[in-house]
Image: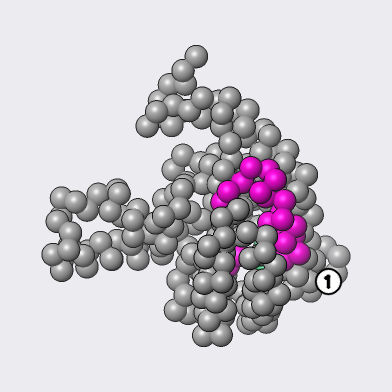
Amino acid sequence: MAAKDITTRTASHVAIIMDGNGRWATSRGWPRLVGHRRGANKVRAIVRAAPGLGIKHLTIFAFSTENWKRSTEEVLGLMALFARYIRNEAEKLREAGVRVRFIGSRDRLDPVIQELMAGIEAKTRDCERLTLTVAINYGGRDEIARAAKKLAEDVAAGRLKPEEAGEDALAARLDTADMPDPDLIIRTSGETRTSNFLLWQSAYAEYEFTPTLWPDFTPEELAAIIDRFSRRERRFGGVVSA
Ligand code: FPP
């Protein structure tokens, strides 16, 4: 791949691992769900600020394939929060030109939530200012395994020749098939793990880790991170031209 000119680099696709809601709440002696509620408010603020920062794609990690291990109360509370967010925000997001999409495996989700997800995707399909992709019941390995299964099925059915089963064919079967790869992945709360987020798509992404807990994250901090990113070199394994 060709090297990029550092003067023209923009964070057009930003992905965020929104971590620290639980600690934000428990450090105040409050239930974890209060932290998630504050976290959802912060999603609203960041989505509103994103287009002004040059972001065209914003992808957020809302619920991982591992999050089912949390208490029933917390899982149900998070699901209720997603449902409320979709119901309250759908019209506002459409008016703001935000297309909403979901990645992850939907089968295990409550049918009511699945319906709300399909509804907001249909309602905002033609919006072009920003694409907000929400990862729910998402895991990078799960996504790659599902894509590999589709690939195998297509080869077995004669729809694809074995020699065509390469990188492009696999990428075309991921949940993110028609999306660009992320330029920048941000994780809040001081953890420096990638936690199975966008495993395939992050091959050339830059990572930024901030100690800020997600409910305390601000559009100003996002702007500062993007500013730093746009000054950093990226080589794609090649050589940056002078
Ligand atoms: C991580 O904090 C956060 C989550 C697992 C859930 C993310 C959900 C939201 C921000 C709320 C709503 C989202 C939408 C799309 C409306 P944590 O609980 O792991 O925090 P901890 O590490 O401090 O325990």
Residue that extends furthest to the right in the rendered view of this protein: 28
Q: Does the segment drawn in magenta span residue 165? A: no
Q: Residue at x 65, y 71 (%)?
A: 90
For residue 185, say whether it is visible: no
SS state under label 1: loop
Q: Residue at x 34, y 60 (%)?
A: 173
User: Residue at point 66% right, 39% down?
Assistant: 226
Q: Residue at image x 75%, y 48%?
A: 219
Residue 213 appears at what percent x and percent y?
75, 54
The residue that mark 1 highlights is: 30
x, y percentage for residue 115?
Answer: 53, 81
Query: Crowdedness of circle 1 by 10 Å Cα count: few (<14), some, many (20+)?
Result: few
Q: Position of residue 128 (x, y in %)?
A: 56, 55
The reply to whether the magenta stretch includes residue 46 is yes
Q: Which residues are magenta?
A: 39-64
Ligand 1's image quarter is: bottom right
- Number of numbered discs present? 1
Vertical comparison of 125 with 171: above or below: below
- Is disc 1's CB within 8 Å of ligand 1? no
Residue furthest out toward the bottom = 111
Image side of residue 160 versus residue 239, left or right: left
Describe the colour scheme in one phrase: one colour
**Is residue 165 something one can see in this rendering?**
yes
Tell me the kind of residue under disc 1.
Answer: Trp
Image quadrant in which you'd find residue 223:
top right
Q: Position of residue 76 (x, y in %)?
A: 64, 81
- Most extreme residue toward the top is 242
